[in-house]
Image (spheres, helix red, strand yellow):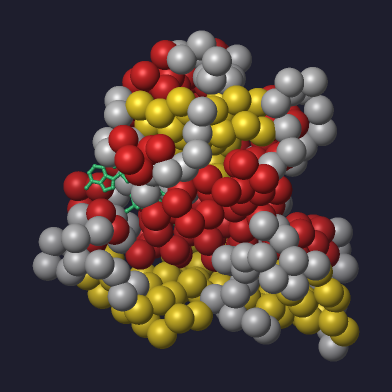
Amino acid sequence: MNDVNWGVLGAGWLVKTATGHAIHNAQGATLYATGARDLARAEATGAVKTYTEYQNVLDDPNVDAVYICLSNEAHLPWIRACIAAGKHVLCEKPMVLTEADAVAVFAEADAAGVLLVEAVWSRWHPRMRRIVELATSGSLGEITNYLGTFTFDGVDPDNYRLSPDHGGGALYDVGIYPLHGLFGVLPQVESVSVLAAEYTRTDRGVDLTTKATLGWGDGSQGSIVGSFVMPESQRLTIIGTHGELRVEDNEAFASFGKPTQLWINGHIEDFSSTDAYQVMFEEVSAKIRGKDGWLLPHRDSIRVARTVDSLL
Ligand SMILES: NC(=O)c1ccc[n+]([C@@H]2O[C@H](COP(=O)([O-])OP(=O)(O)OC[C@H]3O[C@@H](n4cnc5c(N)ncnc54)[C@H](OP(=O)(O)O)[C@@H]3O)[C@@H](O)[C@H]2O)c1
């Protein structure tokens, strides 16, 4: 079966350092076209075709699917343009900025008969899939406590991450990872309530830090932290009525290309080195070709967007 020809919108940091290589290395995928405002950056991705207009990527009849890796406010209009062009879409997180937009674009993609998937790469990592399996199979009992952090210190002052006009902010950028972990392990929970929240914001209103305590069920609680101004940390601890699991390497949501471990009730499980971006492109490409492949459920993207709405 033919490879899926991917078109990429944007050739910024993530495409250059990780996802461009991931598409080249992925089985069943070809990096066919890249669109970037700067042609030299587009060419550096090694795509067969390069354009300075994103629309040219969508208009290319050889492009089967589009990976959107633009600043966050640009995701929604370009998802819609891809759907209008009849292309499948894998869009970087946060896919869109509100629950209403998430619900709307999923419906539009379904109506057009194209796949639309949020590229939360951590969810394709084998360790995270094992965590979800352990939590949802009942091995830990009922999940009563969750702690997930994704923090680092230092964003370039000119980066879109600090711009309210570009969907900036720590919750959208990194806090979203522990939220996706939370909903991955709580398939039965439709919504969580915000029990407490604390923010540090710039004078333009962009959150540099969001800390939240979320509640569900009969007194169960989870804490999530996302920050641009705290020491680097990616912790994950999940406690259930029958057991506990922990990630102890401080790379719970962004482990890249190295072996990892999972602590479960005093035992260690080992996972070999993985590029979860590559796995993501392989599985989405397989699904596009009608083969088996795991996709992040629409419902998870919607539940996370709903929680972000209630926090921001
Ligand atoms: N999954 C992950 O691990 C991960 C990691 C980092 C980021 N992300 C997500 O990936 C996306 C891109 O992140 P990145 O770190 O690669 O960002 P970036 O390098 O700062 O920007 C990505 C692209 O967005 C466009 N862009 C950036 N700032 C812009 C502005 N002010 N006005 C207009 N366009 C602008 C540019 O497109 P051109 O190339 O056309 O100039 C740029 O290449 C974001 O949605 C982010 O949340 C995901």
Can residue 192 be seen here? no
Residue 91 position within the rendered picture, expressed as x and y whole percent measured from the top left: 49, 38
Q: Residue at x 62, y 42 (%)?
A: 24
Instruction: Name the side, left or right, on which 258 lies relative to 44.
Output: right
The residue closer to the viewer here, 83 or 147, is: 83
- Seen from the viewer's position, the closer of residues 212 and 150 is 150
Spot occupied by residue 88 in the image (x, y as percentages of width and height): 56, 24
User: Against 105, is 139 above or below?
Assistant: below
Above or below 36: residue 57: above
Q: Residue at x 30, y 29 (%)?
A: 52
Q: Is residue 57 left or right of residue 106?
A: left
Residue extending furthest toward the left: 203
Image quadrant holding the C terminus, namely bottom left
23 lies above or below 226: above
Splitting the image into 4 quarters, where does residue 146 fall? bottom right
Residue that extends furthest to the bottom in the rendered view of this protein: 266
The picture places residue 266, in percent across and down from the top left corner, at 85, 88
- Residue drawn where x is 62% and y is 68% of the image: 255
Front position in the image: 203 or 249 = 249
On the image, the x and y values in percent for residue 248 come to: 67, 84
In front of the other: 165 or 139: 165
Q: Quadrant of residue 147?
A: bottom right
Observer able to see residue 262 = yes
